[in-house]
Amino acid sequence: MEHTEKLRHIPKVDRLLEEPEIKEMLKSLPRRHVVLRIQAQLEELRKGILEGKTKEVSYDLLKDRILIELKKAKKPRLVPVINATGVVVHTNLGRSPLPQRLIEDLFDIACGYSNLEYDLSLGKRGNRFTHVEGILKELTGAEAATVVNNNAAAVLLALDTIAKGKEVIVSRGELIEIGGSFRIPEVMKRSGAKLVEVGTTNKTKLSDYEQAITSETGLLLKVHTSNYKIIGFTQSVEGEKLVELGRRYSIPVMEDLGSGCFVDFSQFGYEKEPTVQEVVAQGVDIVTFSGDKLLGGPQAGIIVGKREFVEKIRKNQLARALRIDKLTLFSLEWILRLYLDQQKALETIPTLQMITAPYENLLKKAKLMLKKIGIKDSPNFSISLKEGSSKVGGGALPALNLKTALISIAPKRLKIQDMEEFFRNYDPPIIVRVEKDSIVMDVRTILEKDQDKVVEAIKKLALIG
Ligand SMILES: *Cc1c(COP(=O)(O)O)cnc(C)c1O
Protein backbone atom coordinates (compact mmCIF):
# COMPACT_ATOMS: atom_id res chain seq x y z
CA MET A 1 0.00 0.00 0.00
CA GLU A 2 2.66 2.36 1.08
CA HIS A 3 4.55 1.57 -2.11
CA THR A 4 1.67 2.69 -4.31
CA GLU A 5 1.49 5.93 -2.38
CA LYS A 6 5.18 6.58 -2.98
CA LEU A 7 4.98 5.52 -6.62
CA ARG A 8 2.27 8.11 -7.13
CA HIS A 9 4.73 10.78 -6.00
CA ILE A 10 7.12 10.03 -8.83
CA PRO A 11 7.01 13.11 -11.04
CA LYS A 12 6.09 13.04 -14.73
CA VAL A 13 8.78 13.46 -17.37
CA ASP A 14 7.01 16.56 -18.72
CA ARG A 15 7.20 18.33 -15.39
CA LEU A 16 10.95 17.77 -15.19
CA LEU A 17 11.36 18.98 -18.77
CA GLU A 18 9.85 22.31 -17.67
CA GLU A 19 12.55 22.87 -15.05
CA PRO A 20 14.66 25.89 -16.13
CA GLU A 21 18.02 24.10 -15.60
CA ILE A 22 16.89 21.10 -17.60
CA LYS A 23 15.46 23.38 -20.28
CA GLU A 24 18.90 24.97 -20.49
CA MET A 25 20.39 21.54 -21.15
CA LEU A 26 18.00 21.07 -24.05
CA LYS A 27 19.90 23.78 -25.92
CA SER A 28 22.97 21.59 -26.22
CA LEU A 29 21.60 18.04 -25.91
CA PRO A 30 19.05 16.37 -28.17
CA ARG A 31 15.58 16.22 -26.57
CA ARG A 32 15.37 12.44 -27.00
CA HIS A 33 18.65 12.04 -25.18
CA VAL A 34 17.42 14.17 -22.26
CA VAL A 35 14.10 12.31 -22.08
CA LEU A 36 15.88 8.95 -22.03
CA ARG A 37 18.08 10.03 -19.17
CA ILE A 38 15.14 11.37 -17.16
CA GLN A 39 13.27 8.13 -17.76
CA ALA A 40 16.27 6.11 -16.61
CA GLN A 41 16.40 8.09 -13.34
CA LEU A 42 12.65 7.68 -12.80
CA GLU A 43 12.97 3.97 -13.41
CA GLU A 44 15.78 3.80 -10.90
CA LEU A 45 13.57 5.55 -8.36
CA ARG A 46 10.67 3.18 -9.07
CA LYS A 47 12.90 0.19 -8.54
CA GLY A 48 14.21 1.63 -5.29
CA ILE A 49 10.65 2.07 -4.00
CA LEU A 50 9.57 -1.44 -4.99
CA GLU A 51 12.61 -2.96 -3.34
CA GLY A 52 11.94 -0.91 -0.23
CA LYS A 53 15.27 0.89 -0.50
CA THR A 54 13.89 4.37 -1.20
CA LYS A 55 12.33 5.84 1.92
CA GLU A 56 10.83 8.95 0.35
CA VAL A 57 10.62 10.66 -3.00
CA SER A 58 12.51 13.93 -2.98
CA TYR A 59 11.83 16.00 -6.06
CA ASP A 60 14.90 18.21 -5.60
CA LEU A 61 17.22 15.27 -5.09
CA LEU A 62 15.85 13.63 -8.20
CA LYS A 63 16.31 16.81 -10.21
CA ASP A 64 19.90 17.16 -9.01
CA ARG A 65 20.66 13.61 -9.95
CA ILE A 66 19.24 14.12 -13.42
CA LEU A 67 21.29 17.29 -13.86
CA ILE A 68 24.47 15.46 -12.87
CA GLU A 69 23.70 12.75 -15.40
CA LEU A 70 23.01 15.30 -18.13
CA LYS A 71 26.22 17.18 -17.39
CA LYS A 72 28.12 13.91 -17.67
CA ALA A 73 26.38 13.19 -20.97
CA LYS A 74 27.67 16.45 -22.41
CA LYS A 75 31.27 15.42 -21.89
CA PRO A 76 33.12 12.77 -23.91
CA ARG A 77 33.67 9.51 -22.08
CA LEU A 78 37.31 9.34 -23.12
CA VAL A 79 39.04 12.11 -21.17
CA PRO A 80 42.63 13.03 -20.37
CA VAL A 81 43.93 11.76 -17.03
CA ILE A 82 47.11 12.45 -15.10
CA ASN A 83 49.35 9.42 -14.68
CA ALA A 84 50.96 9.63 -11.25
CA THR A 85 51.61 5.88 -11.06
CA GLY A 86 55.19 6.00 -12.30
CA VAL A 87 54.49 3.32 -14.90
CA VAL A 88 55.65 5.05 -18.06
CA VAL A 89 54.06 2.85 -20.73
CA HIS A 90 50.76 2.26 -18.90
CA THR A 91 48.43 0.27 -21.13
CA ASN A 92 45.31 1.20 -19.12
CA LEU A 93 46.18 4.87 -19.42
CA GLY A 94 46.84 4.96 -23.16
CA ARG A 95 50.52 3.95 -23.25
CA SER A 96 52.65 6.63 -24.94
CA PRO A 97 51.77 10.34 -24.90
CA LEU A 98 52.64 11.97 -28.21
CA PRO A 99 54.61 15.21 -28.60
CA GLN A 100 52.38 18.27 -28.90
CA ARG A 101 54.12 19.38 -32.09
CA LEU A 102 53.12 16.14 -33.76
CA ILE A 103 49.47 16.88 -33.11
CA GLU A 104 49.82 20.39 -34.52
CA ASP A 105 51.28 18.90 -37.69
CA LEU A 106 48.51 16.31 -37.79
CA PHE A 107 45.88 19.01 -38.17
CA ASP A 108 46.00 19.29 -41.96
CA ILE A 109 45.87 15.53 -42.49
CA ALA A 110 42.97 15.17 -40.09
CA CYS A 111 40.91 18.04 -41.51
CA GLY A 112 41.52 17.43 -45.19
CA TYR A 113 42.36 14.94 -47.93
CA SER A 114 45.78 13.35 -48.24
CA ASN A 115 47.77 11.06 -50.55
CA LEU A 116 47.07 8.15 -48.19
CA GLU A 117 46.65 5.65 -51.03
CA TYR A 118 47.60 7.79 -53.98
CA ASP A 119 50.98 7.82 -55.69
CA LEU A 120 51.65 11.48 -56.47
CA SER A 121 54.56 10.74 -58.83
CA LEU A 122 52.56 8.34 -60.99
CA GLY A 123 49.13 9.89 -60.58
CA LYS A 124 47.78 6.47 -59.74
CA ARG A 125 46.48 4.47 -56.83
CA GLY A 126 49.16 3.73 -54.23
CA ASN A 127 49.57 1.84 -50.95
CA ARG A 128 49.29 3.34 -47.50
CA PHE A 129 52.26 1.50 -46.03
CA THR A 130 54.67 3.02 -48.57
CA HIS A 131 54.76 6.20 -46.47
CA VAL A 132 56.69 4.44 -43.73
CA GLU A 133 58.35 1.54 -45.51
CA GLY A 134 61.42 3.50 -46.64
CA ILE A 135 62.17 4.93 -43.24
CA LEU A 136 61.58 1.60 -41.46
CA LYS A 137 64.03 -0.07 -43.83
CA GLU A 138 66.56 2.64 -43.17
CA LEU A 139 66.17 2.45 -39.38
CA THR A 140 66.18 -1.34 -39.08
CA GLY A 141 68.23 -2.50 -42.03
CA ALA A 142 65.39 -4.81 -43.13
CA GLU A 143 64.62 -5.59 -46.79
CA ALA A 144 60.95 -4.69 -46.44
CA ALA A 145 58.43 -3.36 -43.93
CA THR A 146 54.73 -2.88 -43.43
CA VAL A 147 52.43 -1.66 -40.68
CA VAL A 148 49.08 -2.70 -39.24
CA ASN A 149 46.71 -1.74 -36.44
CA ASN A 150 48.76 -3.07 -33.49
CA ASN A 151 51.35 -5.71 -32.68
CA ALA A 152 48.72 -8.33 -31.81
CA ALA A 153 47.42 -7.85 -35.36
CA ALA A 154 50.96 -8.07 -36.73
CA VAL A 155 51.57 -11.42 -35.00
CA LEU A 156 48.19 -12.80 -36.07
CA LEU A 157 48.67 -11.68 -39.66
CA ALA A 158 52.21 -13.03 -39.91
CA LEU A 159 51.22 -16.42 -38.46
CA ASP A 160 48.14 -16.62 -40.68
CA THR A 161 50.22 -15.83 -43.76
CA ILE A 162 53.24 -18.01 -43.11
CA ALA A 163 52.13 -20.86 -40.86
CA LYS A 164 48.43 -21.49 -41.43
CA GLY A 165 47.80 -25.25 -41.28
CA LYS A 166 51.42 -25.87 -40.35
CA GLU A 167 53.32 -26.44 -37.14
CA VAL A 168 55.00 -23.58 -35.30
CA ILE A 169 57.73 -24.41 -32.83
CA VAL A 170 57.90 -22.22 -29.72
CA SER A 171 59.86 -22.53 -26.48
CA ARG A 172 57.74 -23.34 -23.39
CA GLY A 173 59.44 -20.44 -21.64
CA GLU A 174 57.98 -18.04 -24.21
CA LEU A 175 54.31 -19.09 -24.20
CA ILE A 176 53.32 -15.86 -22.61
CA GLU A 177 50.19 -13.97 -21.79
CA ILE A 178 50.40 -10.23 -21.83
CA GLY A 179 47.69 -7.89 -20.50
CA GLY A 180 44.29 -7.90 -22.19
CA SER A 181 44.43 -11.69 -22.61
CA PHE A 182 46.73 -11.77 -25.61
CA ARG A 183 48.07 -15.29 -25.27
CA ILE A 184 50.48 -16.74 -27.75
CA PRO A 185 48.75 -20.17 -27.82
CA GLU A 186 45.35 -18.49 -28.45
CA VAL A 187 46.64 -16.26 -31.22
CA MET A 188 48.20 -19.32 -32.77
CA LYS A 189 44.86 -21.13 -32.73
CA ARG A 190 43.13 -18.17 -34.38
CA SER A 191 45.68 -18.09 -37.15
CA GLY A 192 45.13 -21.78 -37.91
CA ALA A 193 48.72 -22.67 -37.02
CA LYS A 194 49.50 -25.62 -34.79
CA LEU A 195 51.57 -24.94 -31.72
CA VAL A 196 54.44 -27.25 -30.95
CA GLU A 197 55.96 -26.56 -27.53
CA VAL A 198 59.56 -27.42 -26.89
CA GLY A 199 61.92 -27.31 -23.93
CA THR A 200 60.88 -26.53 -20.37
CA THR A 201 59.78 -23.34 -18.66
CA ASN A 202 63.30 -22.34 -17.66
CA LYS A 203 65.46 -24.07 -20.26
CA THR A 204 65.18 -24.56 -23.98
CA LYS A 205 68.10 -25.70 -26.13
CA LEU A 206 68.70 -25.54 -29.84
CA SER A 207 68.45 -29.33 -29.98
CA ASP A 208 64.92 -29.11 -28.55
CA TYR A 209 63.88 -27.08 -31.58
CA GLU A 210 65.74 -29.34 -33.97
CA GLN A 211 64.18 -32.53 -32.61
CA ALA A 212 60.68 -31.07 -33.03
CA ILE A 213 61.15 -30.26 -36.71
CA THR A 214 58.98 -32.38 -39.04
CA SER A 215 57.81 -32.08 -42.64
CA GLU A 216 54.84 -30.12 -41.22
CA THR A 217 56.95 -27.41 -39.57
CA GLY A 218 56.18 -24.00 -41.07
CA LEU A 219 57.89 -21.61 -38.69
CA LEU A 220 60.29 -21.25 -35.77
CA LEU A 221 58.93 -18.56 -33.47
CA LYS A 222 60.73 -16.60 -30.78
CA VAL A 223 58.65 -14.44 -28.45
CA HIS A 224 59.89 -11.71 -26.16
CA THR A 225 58.77 -12.65 -22.65
CA SER A 226 57.81 -9.01 -22.08
CA ASN A 227 56.20 -8.65 -18.69
CA TYR A 228 58.02 -11.38 -16.85
CA LYS A 229 61.50 -12.66 -16.40
CA ILE A 230 62.83 -16.02 -15.40
CA ILE A 231 65.95 -15.73 -13.32
CA GLY A 232 68.34 -18.34 -12.04
CA PHE A 233 68.95 -21.58 -13.89
CA THR A 234 67.86 -20.54 -17.35
CA GLN A 235 68.73 -21.02 -20.97
CA SER A 236 67.17 -19.84 -24.20
CA VAL A 237 68.30 -19.95 -27.78
CA GLU A 238 69.66 -16.80 -29.34
CA GLY A 239 68.05 -15.51 -32.49
CA GLU A 240 71.25 -16.10 -34.43
CA LYS A 241 71.33 -19.82 -33.62
CA LEU A 242 67.67 -20.22 -34.43
CA VAL A 243 68.21 -18.50 -37.77
CA GLU A 244 71.04 -20.89 -38.56
CA LEU A 245 68.82 -23.86 -37.72
CA GLY A 246 66.00 -22.45 -39.84
CA ARG A 247 68.34 -22.00 -42.80
CA ARG A 248 69.53 -25.60 -42.53
CA TYR A 249 65.97 -26.91 -42.77
CA SER A 250 64.59 -24.10 -45.00
CA ILE A 251 62.13 -23.00 -42.32
CA PRO A 252 61.49 -19.29 -41.75
CA VAL A 253 62.19 -17.74 -38.34
CA MET A 254 60.02 -15.07 -36.75
CA GLU A 255 60.55 -13.01 -33.62
CA ASP A 256 57.78 -11.16 -31.79
CA LEU A 257 59.76 -8.47 -30.03
CA GLY A 258 56.75 -7.03 -28.22
CA SER A 259 57.97 -3.62 -27.23
CA GLY A 260 60.69 -3.26 -29.80
CA CYS A 261 63.06 -0.32 -29.63
CA PHE A 262 65.66 1.38 -31.76
CA VAL A 263 67.57 2.83 -28.80
CA ASP A 264 70.08 0.72 -26.91
CA PHE A 265 69.14 1.38 -23.29
CA SER A 266 72.32 -0.15 -21.93
CA GLN A 267 73.93 3.25 -22.61
CA PHE A 268 71.92 4.51 -19.59
CA GLY A 269 73.13 1.66 -17.42
CA TYR A 270 69.90 -0.30 -17.90
CA GLU A 271 69.97 -3.94 -18.75
CA LYS A 272 70.54 -4.84 -22.40
CA GLU A 273 67.46 -5.39 -24.56
CA PRO A 274 68.06 -6.32 -28.19
CA THR A 275 67.17 -3.46 -30.53
CA VAL A 276 65.15 -4.08 -33.67
CA GLN A 277 68.25 -3.39 -35.81
CA GLU A 278 70.18 -6.08 -33.95
CA VAL A 279 67.46 -8.69 -34.38
CA VAL A 280 67.17 -7.90 -38.08
CA ALA A 281 70.94 -8.18 -38.42
CA GLN A 282 70.79 -11.68 -36.94
CA GLY A 283 68.90 -12.66 -40.06
CA VAL A 284 65.46 -13.21 -38.49
CA ASP A 285 62.97 -13.37 -41.38
CA ILE A 286 60.06 -11.53 -39.76
CA VAL A 287 60.21 -9.22 -36.77
CA THR A 288 57.10 -7.68 -35.21
CA PHE A 289 56.77 -4.96 -32.55
CA SER A 290 54.46 -2.27 -31.17
CA GLY A 291 54.39 1.39 -32.11
CA ASP A 292 53.23 2.67 -28.74
CA LYS A 293 55.44 0.89 -26.24
CA LEU A 294 59.16 1.72 -26.04
CA LEU A 295 59.02 3.36 -29.45
CA GLY A 296 56.83 6.06 -27.90
CA GLY A 297 54.57 6.49 -30.92
CA PRO A 298 50.91 5.81 -31.70
CA GLN A 299 49.23 2.39 -31.47
CA ALA A 300 50.54 0.39 -34.41
CA GLY A 301 51.99 -2.98 -35.29
CA ILE A 302 55.22 -2.91 -37.25
CA ILE A 303 56.42 -5.82 -39.36
CA VAL A 304 59.93 -5.79 -40.82
CA GLY A 305 61.92 -8.53 -42.48
CA LYS A 306 62.62 -10.40 -45.70
CA ARG A 307 60.84 -9.06 -48.76
CA GLU A 308 59.42 -12.42 -49.74
CA PHE A 309 57.48 -12.74 -46.47
CA VAL A 310 56.49 -9.10 -46.04
CA GLU A 311 54.99 -9.11 -49.54
CA LYS A 312 52.93 -12.21 -48.77
CA ILE A 313 51.76 -10.61 -45.52
CA ARG A 314 50.62 -7.50 -47.38
CA LYS A 315 48.61 -9.54 -49.85
CA ASN A 316 46.79 -11.50 -47.13
CA GLN A 317 43.04 -10.70 -47.19
CA LEU A 318 43.17 -10.23 -43.42
CA ALA A 319 45.55 -7.28 -43.86
CA ARG A 320 42.64 -5.16 -45.00
CA ALA A 321 40.75 -5.79 -41.77
CA LEU A 322 43.81 -4.98 -39.66
CA ARG A 323 45.00 -1.92 -41.50
CA ILE A 324 46.32 1.23 -39.91
CA ASP A 325 44.33 4.47 -40.21
CA LYS A 326 45.63 7.71 -41.69
CA LEU A 327 45.96 9.67 -38.44
CA THR A 328 48.00 6.89 -36.90
CA LEU A 329 50.08 6.47 -40.01
CA PHE A 330 50.97 10.15 -40.07
CA SER A 331 51.86 10.07 -36.37
CA LEU A 332 53.97 6.96 -36.82
CA GLU A 333 55.91 8.47 -39.71
CA TRP A 334 56.47 11.63 -37.67
CA ILE A 335 57.88 9.62 -34.74
CA LEU A 336 59.99 7.35 -36.95
CA ARG A 337 61.60 10.38 -38.61
CA LEU A 338 62.89 11.53 -35.22
CA TYR A 339 64.83 8.29 -34.85
CA LEU A 340 67.04 9.20 -37.81
CA ASP A 341 68.81 11.26 -35.14
CA GLN A 342 68.66 9.28 -31.89
CA GLN A 343 69.56 12.27 -29.75
CA LYS A 344 66.59 14.12 -31.18
CA ALA A 345 64.33 11.14 -30.52
CA LEU A 346 65.50 11.00 -26.89
CA GLU A 347 64.83 14.72 -26.46
CA THR A 348 61.47 14.86 -28.21
CA ILE A 349 59.56 11.64 -27.49
CA PRO A 350 57.84 11.87 -24.08
CA THR A 351 58.11 8.11 -23.37
CA LEU A 352 61.87 8.19 -23.92
CA GLN A 353 62.23 11.43 -21.93
CA MET A 354 60.43 9.89 -18.98
CA ILE A 355 62.35 6.60 -19.07
CA THR A 356 65.71 8.33 -19.19
CA ALA A 357 64.95 11.23 -16.81
CA PRO A 358 67.84 11.51 -14.30
CA TYR A 359 66.96 11.19 -10.61
CA GLU A 360 68.33 14.68 -9.81
CA ASN A 361 65.81 16.22 -12.21
CA LEU A 362 62.94 14.24 -10.73
CA LEU A 363 63.97 15.28 -7.24
CA LYS A 364 64.04 18.91 -8.32
CA LYS A 365 60.61 18.55 -9.87
CA ALA A 366 59.17 16.96 -6.70
CA LYS A 367 60.70 19.65 -4.46
CA LEU A 368 59.27 22.39 -6.63
CA MET A 369 55.83 20.83 -6.50
CA LEU A 370 55.99 20.50 -2.71
CA LYS A 371 57.00 24.13 -2.44
CA LYS A 372 54.03 25.16 -4.56
CA ILE A 373 51.70 23.01 -2.45
CA GLY A 374 53.05 24.85 0.58
CA ILE A 375 51.41 22.49 3.11
CA LYS A 376 53.34 20.00 5.20
CA ASP A 377 50.62 19.10 7.58
CA SER A 378 46.88 19.46 7.31
CA PRO A 379 44.19 17.94 9.53
CA ASN A 380 43.52 15.62 6.58
CA PHE A 381 47.00 14.34 5.76
CA SER A 382 50.71 14.82 6.06
CA ILE A 383 52.84 15.11 2.99
CA SER A 384 56.46 14.25 2.39
CA LEU A 385 59.04 13.49 -0.22
CA LYS A 386 60.25 9.93 -0.63
CA GLU A 387 62.62 7.97 -2.76
CA GLY A 388 61.10 5.11 -4.71
CA SER A 389 61.12 3.40 -8.06
CA SER A 390 59.23 3.66 -11.34
CA LYS A 391 58.60 1.01 -13.96
CA VAL A 392 58.95 1.20 -17.73
CA GLY A 393 55.73 -0.81 -18.28
CA GLY A 394 54.38 -2.12 -21.56
CA GLY A 395 56.19 -5.39 -20.98
CA ALA A 396 59.57 -3.74 -21.47
CA LEU A 397 62.51 -4.15 -19.11
CA PRO A 398 60.32 -5.78 -16.44
CA ALA A 399 63.12 -6.21 -13.92
CA LEU A 400 64.24 -2.61 -14.13
CA ASN A 401 63.53 -0.29 -11.19
CA LEU A 402 64.11 3.36 -12.08
CA LYS A 403 65.06 5.47 -9.08
CA THR A 404 62.50 8.21 -8.67
CA ALA A 405 61.07 10.88 -6.39
CA LEU A 406 57.63 10.33 -4.86
CA ILE A 407 55.20 12.71 -3.24
CA SER A 408 53.83 10.66 -0.38
CA ILE A 409 50.51 11.59 1.21
CA ALA A 410 49.78 9.83 4.49
CA PRO A 411 46.21 9.99 5.78
CA LYS A 412 45.19 11.57 9.07
CA ARG A 413 41.51 12.40 9.19
CA LEU A 414 40.86 10.89 5.76
CA LYS A 415 41.11 7.27 4.77
CA ILE A 416 43.48 6.07 2.06
CA GLN A 417 40.57 4.89 -0.10
CA ASP A 418 38.85 8.28 0.23
CA MET A 419 41.99 10.06 -0.91
CA GLU A 420 42.46 7.72 -3.86
CA GLU A 421 38.83 8.27 -4.82
CA PHE A 422 39.16 12.03 -4.45
CA PHE A 423 42.03 12.09 -6.94
CA ARG A 424 40.35 9.63 -9.29
CA ASN A 425 37.18 11.74 -9.39
CA TYR A 426 39.10 14.99 -9.74
CA ASP A 427 38.87 16.97 -12.95
CA PRO A 428 41.14 15.90 -14.60
CA PRO A 429 41.32 12.51 -12.87
CA ILE A 430 44.67 11.78 -11.20
CA ILE A 431 45.62 8.12 -11.03
CA VAL A 432 47.86 7.48 -8.02
CA ARG A 433 49.66 4.54 -6.48
CA VAL A 434 48.15 3.12 -3.32
CA GLU A 435 50.67 1.82 -0.82
CA LYS A 436 50.16 0.23 2.55
CA ASP A 437 49.97 3.37 4.65
CA SER A 438 49.90 6.21 2.14
CA ILE A 439 49.19 7.14 -1.41
CA VAL A 440 52.11 8.18 -3.54
CA MET A 441 52.50 10.19 -6.69
CA ASP A 442 55.51 9.44 -8.85
CA VAL A 443 56.65 12.70 -10.44
CA ARG A 444 58.33 10.84 -13.33
CA THR A 445 55.07 10.34 -15.23
CA ILE A 446 53.38 13.62 -14.27
CA LEU A 447 53.74 15.65 -17.44
CA GLU A 448 55.04 19.22 -17.30
CA LYS A 449 51.66 20.64 -18.32
CA ASP A 450 49.91 18.78 -15.48
CA GLN A 451 52.16 19.67 -12.55
CA ASP A 452 50.16 22.69 -11.43
CA LYS A 453 46.91 20.75 -11.68
CA VAL A 454 48.29 18.13 -9.31
CA VAL A 455 49.42 20.89 -6.93
CA GLU A 456 45.92 22.39 -6.98
CA ALA A 457 44.30 19.00 -6.34
CA ILE A 458 46.45 18.36 -3.28
CA LYS A 459 45.68 21.83 -1.94
CA LYS A 460 41.96 21.12 -2.35
CA LEU A 461 42.29 17.80 -0.56
CA ALA A 462 43.60 19.73 2.44
CA LEU A 463 40.38 21.76 2.56
CA ILE A 464 37.74 19.06 2.45
CA GLY A 465 35.97 17.58 5.44
C1 LIG B 1 52.63 -6.02 -26.17
C2 LIG B 1 52.93 -7.28 -26.85
C3 LIG B 1 52.09 -7.75 -27.89
C4 LIG B 1 50.86 -7.02 -28.32
O1 LIG B 1 51.15 -5.77 -28.81
P1 LIG B 1 49.99 -4.67 -29.00
O2 LIG B 1 50.66 -3.56 -29.69
O3 LIG B 1 49.50 -4.36 -27.62
O4 LIG B 1 48.92 -5.29 -29.81
C5 LIG B 1 52.44 -8.92 -28.50
N1 LIG B 1 53.54 -9.62 -28.13
C6 LIG B 1 54.36 -9.21 -27.14
C7 LIG B 1 55.55 -10.03 -26.78
C8 LIG B 1 54.08 -8.03 -26.46
O5 LIG B 1 54.87 -7.61 -25.47
Image (tube, grey):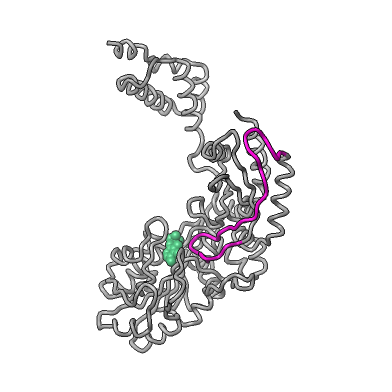
Quick check: can you spot residue 309?
no
* Quadrant assignment for the N terminus: top left
> Going by the picture, which residue comes out furthest to the bottom?
248
Image spot of residue 463 (x, y percent): 65, 31
Residue occupying the point 38% across, 72% down: 173
Image spot of residue 400 (x, y percent): 55, 65
Residue occupying the point 36% across, 25% down: 44
Per the image, is 366 magenta? no
Q: Is residue 19 positioned above or below 383 on the image? A: above
Horizontal side of residue 143 vs 340, given as left or right:
left
Q: Is residue 164 positioned above or below 358 on the image? A: below
Residue occupying the point 45% across, 83% down: 240
Per the image, is 391 magenta? yes
Q: Quadrant of residue 372?
A: top right
* Quadrant assignment for the C terminus: top right
Horizontal side of residue 249 vs 143, given as left or right:
left
Q: Quadrant of residue 297?
A: bottom right
Q: Is residue 77 positioned above or below 62 on the image? A: below
Image spot of residue 417 (x, y percent): 51, 39
Quick check: can you spot residue 408?
yes
Q: Nearer the viewer, residue 254 or 395?
A: 395
Q: Nearer the viewer, residue 114 or 340?
A: 340
Residue occupying the point 52% across, 20% down: 21
Q: What residue span does the magenta drawing correspond to?
A: 375-402
Image spot of residue 128 (x, y percent): 47, 63
| Quarter, ligand 1 | bottom left
Q: Nearer the viewer, residue 50 or 333?
A: 50
Q: Nearer the viewer, residue 81 or 247?
A: 81
Horizontal side of residue 435 vs 456, given as left or right:
left
